[in-house]
Amino acid sequence: MTGRSNEKLRLSRRALLAAGAAGAAAFGTPLLAGCDSSGGGSGPKGSKPTIPPMELGPEVKGPVFKSGYVGPRAREKKPFGDGKKTFRIVVPQDSQTVGDWNKNKTTAWFEERTGVKVKFEAVLITNPNGGDDMTKINAMLSGGDLPDAFMGVPFTTAQVSLYGQQGLFQPLDDLIATYAPETRQAMKDYPDLRALKASNDGKLYQMPGVNDCYHCRSSNGRAWISQTYLDKVGAKMPTTTEELRQVLLEFKGKNPSGKSGFVPFASGVNNALDPFFMQPFLYTPGGDQNGGWMRLNNGKVEFTPNLPEWREALKYLRQLGDDGVLTAQNFSMSDTELQTAGNKGMIGFARAYWWGSFFNPVTLEKDAPWRDYVAVPPLKGPNGNQVAQWDYYGFSTNGLQITSACKNPEILVQWSDYQMDLESIMWMYDGIKDKNWFWAKEGADGIDGGQALFRDVQWPAPEGQSWNQYATMYRSLDFRGGQQVNPKEPTYEKGLYDAGRLYEPFAQKKEMQLPPVIIPDESAAQVADTATSIQQQVKQGLSQFALGKKDINKDADWQGYVDAFKSMDLQGYLDIYQKAYDSRPK
């Protein structure tokens, strides 16, 4: 759900090379001297680059920007590589979209634009059973068969930090300061970006990227309801926990679908209840987020599932269980079962990430049934609490990691930086210009209601045209909001954006969200083991209390639940996170 013709260069690579250093400097791109593998740049070993920092070039005509636009811009770019060296870069295998990386249309276009030759080595990373299979990547790292760089490989920040401090990845700060004006601009526009991608020694061992998905900021805590079924039972959109309870009772009693097997309230194994239902009682992040159910309270890391407000939320869920609208099915339905029920029109209210969680496929016809489901606003609890989960840090992405095997990291830093130019972003994300994407015309509407920036024909682009979403990118909030809306063929992106706007006024304060932190390697195993135990205890407690297998109204049952966390050394777990938070890169 993350969303989406070059002029011939007047100066050929041969002409650029013939011009020499002085001629190249006249075009604003100094020829790059060789450098050692320490990442220090041109000059003696370990020294900083001695050339002046490269600056952003002049903008080119074509794109139309909305007022106040923040994000990538299309600028004049000249090739800077001499084509004498071919860099080996490992990338994920993607036969459906990218195809053969070395024969891809964007690969050819970008080589012409930069003058840099790259041989891509595609590695199968996606595990058919889910998750990422890093076996081949790990073999390269441990066996010494290092490429010049990795791109699009899903390293965690902790892994990048570890490999960087082991000397496998090169530090890039000095090179970025000299060769990467687009990256510097992105870090200026997003002040948190560098700290989010820095390692725990304070250094950057990767090129940072941005993919600022507006609707993703609230996606983990959303819920949806059928407008048609609301109308049929004569109810209005619920705004409080009690109003939702009454709507669910109406759904259960009147079955507005008229079909056997109607589900008044749907959720499932991958659609946990707590991200939506706990917020009317207390702000709590979901268990799949950084740390799992941890928030900040005046700078202190705090665990939420053992707080009194969590107990009050469980009492509400128990009430829904007693009403018969929340059942064991809410904790057991698979994705396929949810989607089957949705496709048959048998769901009234759904606690889910988006429509694709309970419809398959999400087609784009104007009368597609998923369009009937509208976002339920954050509910107000009995004590007046009304808050929405809001992710302030999810915009940062991995770019390029340059290894110790690369003898010219300054070239790859600039090569990566060129990817953050607006036209490069469009090629890499959407394929061939004026074939699968176009600059929007003045007056066209974007997803966010402002001037549109671009329109595309299809996404993903046809096989062999784009790099999908593996490049170093700068897809800012305004860039993504600038995707043109076609009223005749509206996509789900517009609806998700509007859902996000419904939630934003209730977003928790930024200072309450625990930002991503790096757990030290010596504590990683302990944290992983404790996290597994905590996950099991929270999920079991949620279902057992909601379904009445344990009595949330009995102090003894609640105390037994709380004491179980103590036996897991919850305090030691919190102490590790507190130390990681206090020592995080600033």
Image (cartoon, grey):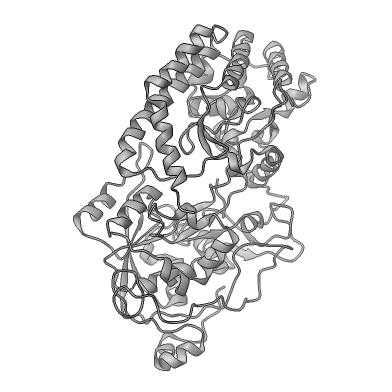
Q: Is residue 83 left or right of residue 72?
A: left
Question: Which residue is rendered at x = 59% and y = 33% of the image?
Answer: 221
Report x, y in % for residue 255: 69, 15
Q: Quadrant of the N terminus?
A: top right
Nearer-the-camera pick, 165 or 468: 165
Task: Tell me if residue 529 can be seen.
Answer: yes
User: Residue 30, image x and y in percent?
Assistant: 44, 84
Question: Nearest the camera: 130 or 238?
Answer: 238
Labels in figure, total: 0
486 horizontally vs 23: left or right: right
Residue at x 47% of width, y 39% of height = 290
Residue 464 appears in which quarter of the rendering? bottom left
The answer to whether residue 260 shows anywhere in this view is no
Q: Quadrant of residue 110?
A: bottom left
Residue in the foreground of this view, choosing between 564 and 484? 564
Q: Position of residue 448 (x, y in %)?
A: 70, 52
User: Relative to residue 403, is residue 580 depicted above or below?
Assistant: above
For residue 38, which quarter of the picture?
Answer: bottom left
Q: Residue shown at 28%/59% (left/top)?
A: 168
Q: Is residue 325 left or right of residue 534?
A: right
- Measured as percent of width and height from the top left, residue 127 is found at 34, 42
Classify 33 as above or below 100: below
